[in-house]
Each structure stands twice: as C-alpha cells, then as structure tokens.
Amino acid sequence: TFSFLLSFTIGLNAQNTTVVTFNATHQRFGNGNDTRTVTDTFLLPPALTGYKQIIMHYTLSCPTGGCDPWDRFAMISLKRDNEWLELGRYMTPYKKGCGADYDVTEYSSLLTGKIVLSSFIDTWVDPGWLVKISFEYVKGTPAIAPTKVENVWQNYNLIYGDPTKPGSFSPGSPVI
C-alpha cells in the first residue's frame, strides 16, 4: 500500500511542512485482528534544502470501546535497505491517549523521498490504540549536517537484570 498526505515547498524559500504518515491507524490484537505491527510506504519531501529540524510527533488515542487497559512497549522504525532503524520507542499509558515529540533531525538524510515506516505496539487486546505519526520539517539552516546514520543497537529482545541470563553487552555499550 502506498499512502501519503503531503504539503511542502522545496528550496531556499522552504516553509514549515508537516507530513502525516500513519493517521488514526488501528493497532490491536484479538477478534481475528493482528495489527500490532503496521508497515506502510510514505512520500516525504524529496530534498531537505532549507530545513533545520525534523520533529516526529506521535499521538495515541482511544478507538471505540476504549484504549488498552495496560501499559505496552511500542516503537517506530524506518527501513533502510534491508535494515530497520529505530526512530523512537515509548510505553503506552493505562486506558488513555497520549502523545510525544521526538527530534529526529539526525535522521534527516533518511527522512526524504519514498520511505517505509513501521509502528509496533505490543498490545494483546482489542480495541488497542489509534496511532498518528507525523513529521514536522522546520524551515531554517541546519546547525550541523549529519554525515552518517548507523544502527548501534540491533537486539530488541535483550534480557538484562536476570542473573540466570547474563547480558551480552560490555560496560559502556549503548542500551537503547
């Protein structure tokens, strides 16, 4: 599926631009539905000339029947070649909506053109959540141009704190 809602200006006269990706996407499990992970392709601005910052906004709201009554692990990822890069992770609240903003400017070289995004919520109930994710491109000159994006941590299921299953990372290793 290819979805997009897009409005932008390219070049030196760039204006603030917001691109909505997932828009009230229903993430749930049960009653024959398993949309805990949703993946889709979106179209972002083709060039980032004139933008100094990119802010990813996520909003969770309650579908008909109410929100998931438990807190759940969730994350938003971007696919680069055959690799998934985590843009942000969060915990859902109990029984109510919420939202947050992430500065994803350092991913700017990847947040352009046609991209694949994935939203995951480890919910095990229906009705689950309605998810909205958008990217706000803020006009201006970047303070520093990113040179490389590297996936430093790729084990999403690392168990730590259990003495019967010692961790495989060394002191000082990033744990995201």
Image (spheres, grey):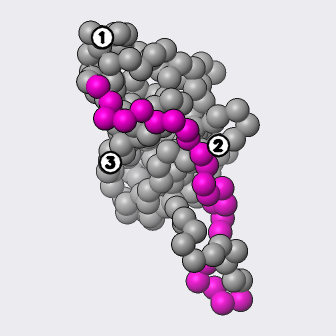
Magenta stretch: give its range: 141-164
Where disc 1 sits, the SS reads loop
Tell me if mark 1 has few (under 14), some (14-19) or many (20+) residues whose alpha carbon lies within 10 angstroms of its own. Answer: few
Of residue 164 and residue 49, the one placed in the foreground of this image is: 49
Residue wearing tag 1: 12
In the image, what residue occupies the spot 37% across and 63% down? 94
Q: Position of residue 170 (x, y in %)?
A: 63, 75
Tell me if mark 3 has few (under 14), some (14-19) or many (20+) residues whose alpha carbon lies within 10 angstroms of its own. Answer: few
Q: Position of residue 153 (x, y in %)?
A: 61, 57
Q: Amino acid at mark 2?
A: Trp
- Tell me if residue 147 is in the magenta stretch: yes
Residue wearing tag 2: 84
Residue 102 higher or lower than 22, as above or below: below
Left or right of residue 97: residue 117: right
In the image, what residue occupies the spot 45% across and 31% down? 108
Mark 1 and mark 3: span between their CA atoms?
Answer: 29 Å
Q: Main secondary structure of the magenta part?
A: loop
Q: Which of the 4 image quarters holds residue 35?
A: top right
Residue 68 higher or lower than 87, as above or below: below
**Mark 1 or mark 3: whose residue is earlier in sequence:** 1
Q: Nearer the viewer, mark 1 or mark 3?
A: 1
Q: Amino acid at mark 3?
A: Ala
Q: Position of residue 139 (x, y in %)?
A: 27, 23
Tell me if mark 2 has few (under 14), some (14-19) or many (20+) residues whose alpha carbon lies within 10 angstroms of its own. Answer: some
Q: Amino acid at mark 1?
A: Leu
Residue wearing tag 3: 100
Where disc 3 sits, the SS reads strand
Q: Position of residue 72 (x, y in %)?
A: 49, 61
Name the mark on residue 78: none
Q: Which of the 4 image quarters holds residue 42?
A: top right
